[in-house]
Image: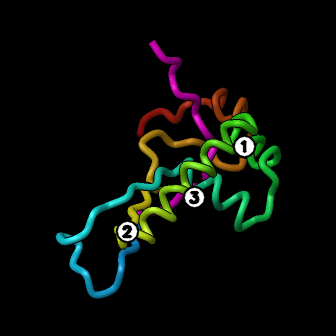
Amino acid sequence: MPRPRKRRCCRRYRADRIYKPQGIPMRDIEVTVLEIDEFEALRLCDAEGLDQTAAGERMGVSRGTVQRLLATARGKLVTAILDRDAIVMNLTQKEVDHAGLHPHQARNRPRRRGV
């Protein structure tokens, strides 16, 4: 039985995003799904210019996990572009992580009551 998945600190986004080739209806193309942790690793390393160690510290995971997330995300993006697939980014989290906090602080944060 595999270990439970570790929670990752990611930026909050309001909605999912979809990118597709122009002129092709959604019903006629395949869909490639990019998860929020893969997108966050891409954003931190490629857009903000952090190295994998710093990105791992910010996300609360190891450098090796960031490397695996980057490889998976880049592979999905290249395959989707070459195959003319739609790219769907699942950017809304089911569990809310407190972005900007160290992972241990986010885990120990008191729960909101009465909501």
In this rendering, the answer to whether 108 lies above or below 26 is above
Q: Quarter holding the C terminus?
A: top left
Q: Where in the figure is residue 33, as x and y percent of width and height? A: 39, 55
User: In terms of sequence position, does the residue under pointer 2 or pointer 1 come before the other?
Assistant: 2
Q: Dot 3 surroundings within 10 Å: few (below 14), some, or many (20 or more)?
A: some
Q: Which residues are magenta?
A: 1-16
Q: Name the residue that disc number 2 marks.
A: 83
Q: Residue furthest front?
A: 82
The residue positioned 37% from the left and 68% from the top of the image is 83
Q: Name the residue that disc number 3 marks.
A: 74
Does the magenta segment cover residue 7?
A: yes
Relative placement, left or right, of 46 versus 74 is right
Name the amino acid, label 3: Arg
Q: Dot 2 surroundings within 10 Å: few (below 14), some, or many (20 or more)?
A: few
Most foreground residue, 81 or 58: 81
Most foreground residue, 98 or 46: 46
Q: Where in the figure is residue 3, as x and y percent of width and height? A: 53, 18
Relative placement, left or right, of 66 versus 2 is right
Name the amino acid, label 2: Asp
Determine the image quadrant of residue 53.
top right
Name the amino acid, label 1: Leu
User: In terms of sequence position, does the residue under pointer 3 or pointer 1 come before the other?
Assistant: 3
Determine the image quadrant of residue 32.
bottom left
Q: Compute the Cα span from label 2 to label 1.
A: 38 Å
Q: Which SS class for mark 1?
A: loop
Q: Compute the Cα span from label 3 to label 1.
A: 27 Å
